[in-house]
Image (tube, rainbow, N blue to C red):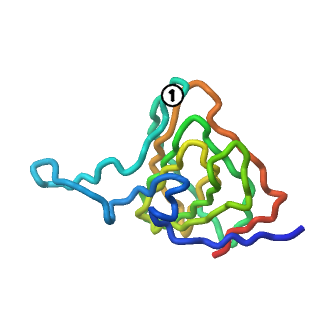
Amino acid sequence: MTETRLPIALLTRAAFAPFGDVIESEGRDHYPINAGMAQRYHDLAEVDVMAGGGRPLISLLKAKPVALPLRLRLMERHPLSSQAFIPLSAVPFLIVVAPASRTLDLARLKAFRSNGRQGINYRRGTWHHPLLALDSVSNFLIVDRGGEGDDCDEIDISDRNIFVES
């Protein structure tokens, strides 16, 4: 069976736009609040969780680091909602995605590296690998959907020999 080696690109708003939003303050509009004691970077991602009577959830995640190269084993998507991961540890992490669709197109996989200060928000239906922390245990704030309905489709791809390179 042939191997596929997936290169890692730097995470930028333009490169990630087909899959969702990059959540970061750098280069973003902001304005003073709290009598000028703080700057608010407003509306950085489109939270989409209301389908089917959903409600927003805020959760914390502690992720163990992975070593590269890494063999991809699973892809998932959330057909009813967006899903955001905001790093709290300032440690780089990897994002593996494919365009939103009913079926996963492995030929369109992309891999990105966050600088550790950038979060991401997957658009509804975007295929993605579960979170991939690098270097050390990393903490994340998650914003996603709670409520009735099946909002997670998973596909086992462990037989495909797809690796993310360092």
All told, the count of numbered labels is 1
Q: Nearer the viewer, residue 97 or 86?
A: 97
Q: Indicate the position of residue 28 as horizontal and vertical percent values.
A: 31, 60
Q: Residues within 10 Å of mark 1 (few under 14, many from 20)?
A: some
Task: Identify the residue shown where x is 84% and y is 58%.
Answer: 159
Q: Nearer the viewer, residue 102 or 36?
A: 102
Q: Nearer the viewer, residue 12 or 145?
A: 12
* In the rendered image, the vertical position of residue 19 relative to residue 1, given as above or below: above
User: Label 1's element?
Assistant: loop
Most extreme residue toward the right, as rendered? 1
Residue 92 shown left or right of residue 27 in the figure: right
Task: Identify the residue shown where x is 55% and y is 25%.
Answer: 52
Q: Indicate the position of residue 166 as horizontal and vertical percent values.
A: 63, 76
Task: Identify the residue shown where x is 41% and y is 56%.
Answer: 23
Q: Indicate the position of residue 29 as horizontal and vertical percent values.
A: 27, 57
**At label 1, which amino acid type do we have?**
Gly
* In the rendered image, the vertical position of residue 160 relative to residue 149, given as above or below: below
* In the rendered image, the vertical position of residue 1 relative to residue 37, given as above or below: below
Most extreme residue toward the left, as rendered? 35
The residue identified by callout 1 is 54
Residue 97 shown left or right of residue 73 in the figure: left
Quarter of the figure with residue 147: top right
Task: Identify the residue shown where x is 73% and y is 54%.
Answer: 105
Q: Indicate the position of residue 118 as horizontal and vertical percent values.
A: 43, 61
Q: Quadrant of the N terminus?
A: bottom right
